[in-house]
Image: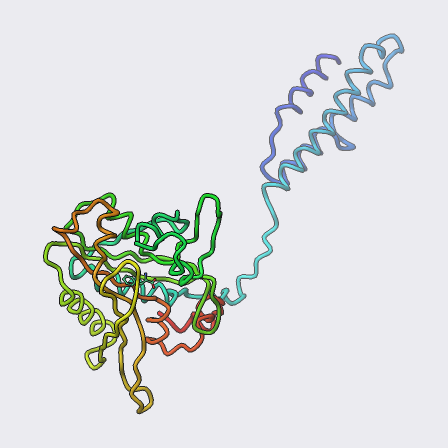
Amino acid sequence: MLKEIEIINEQVATFTATCQQDIEKFRREFTGKNGVIQSFFDRFRELPPESRKSIGAPLNLLKQSALQKLQALQENLNKQTKPVAFDFTLPSRQFEVGSHHPISLVMEEVIGLFERIGFSVKDGPEMEDDWHNFTALNFPEDHPARDMQDTFFISREDKMVLRTHTSSIQVRTLETETPPLRFISPGRVYRCDSDATHSPVFHQIECMCIEKNVSFADLKDVLYYFVHAFFGKEVQIRFRPSYFPFTEPSAEMDIGWEVNGVFRWMEILGCGMVDPNVLRNCNIDADIYSGYAFGVGVERLAMLRYKIKDIRLFYENDLRFLGQFR
Ligand code: PHE
């Protein structure tokens, strides 16, 4: 009988089940009332006491491992065949089609307009040192002009700031590349300012051209191109004298059009001829090269383009607002 127990043990150990019927078969053949193990116990009881000794232990072990196996087979099968709780008659889930953010749309459009006339795109860090954000741009140390931009200081000791304008990218590019240069630098900028038309985080696109014999006329030429391509030919343009540490002369540019039958001028950007000091700070020979630059707020452009009154709408992520732009 020991030999038989051994054979059944082997069969139990190697049994596999791929469906519930297999498991029922296992129960029938091995652990059930009419199974082989029960029949062993029946025979065991008939044995003379001296032969029982050697059989009892292996027989109990066989019973135990068969029951364990049965449990394992069942658990395994349950894992494989999760009940399908799926109602195929349900309507499908609505999925929303995303859209581009109006700031991205305007940014991409402006980048495209400038790429078309030979400007490349330059990038730079949003956390800047004092040199790139101020000093190289001809802001004198401790000059109140630095307050003009309500700077967020990250560390006063290391003089690290959140860049207040993308003009810092001008410096980085002038330091590492040699003219002639024509590029724009779009990006996020930061100023401590917040109301319906000012946000502490906003976007600028700055444009720079450094070549030989560049004049204010070239700057005006590019600005006319840009404004007319972006807003349309009927839009008028005027320049007002202004001040920036990094340009000389400097100007503020307004665009004018009729709003509800009333003609209005709106300030849209700052511009000027790059101050020779900026070029010298970046090791560029200011006797050979000159250039122009301007910086425009992307939110301002988007507010004019889409007739948006409150800048905060851009950052609230209200889908009813964002879904209107494609
Ligand atoms: N950097 C200026 C600003 O942020 C804009 C500007 C750029 C003006 C380039 C002139 C030339 O306000």
Q: Is residue 110 above or below residue 163?
A: below
Residue positioned most to the left: 213
Q: Is residue 180 above or below residue 102?
A: above
Give the camera-side residue of 201 and 39. Answer: 201
User: Seen in the image, is 314 located left or right of residue 77?
Assistant: left
**Residue 273, located in which quarter of the rendered image?**
bottom left
Q: Is residue 162 visible?
A: yes
Q: Is residue 125 above or below residue 149?
A: above
Residue positioned most to the right: 49
**Residue 220, located in which quarter of the rendered image?**
bottom left
Q: Is residue 189 visible?
A: no
Give the camera-side residue of 287 and 211. Answer: 287
Residue positioned most to the top: 50
Q: Residue at image x 63%, y 39%?
A: 21
- For the image shown, how many numbered marks are present on the structure? 0
Q: Residue at image x 10%, y 58%?
A: 213
Q: Residue at image x 39%, y 54%?
A: 163
Residue 24: x %, y % from top left: 68, 37
Residue 71: x %, y % from top left: 71, 34
User: Seen in the image, is 234 located left or right of residue 129?
Assistant: left
User: Seen in the image, is 64 located left or right of residue 232?
Assistant: right
Residue 65: x %, y % from top left: 73, 24
Residue positioned most to the bottom: 261
Residue 54: x %, y % from top left: 81, 10
Q: Quadrant of ligand 1?
A: bottom left
Give the camera-side residue of 292 and 234. Answer: 292
The N terminus lies in quadrant: top right
The C terminus lies in quadrant: bottom left
Q: Residue at image x 77%, y 20%?
A: 61
The color scheme shown is rainbow
Give the camera-side residue of 241 and 20. Answer: 241
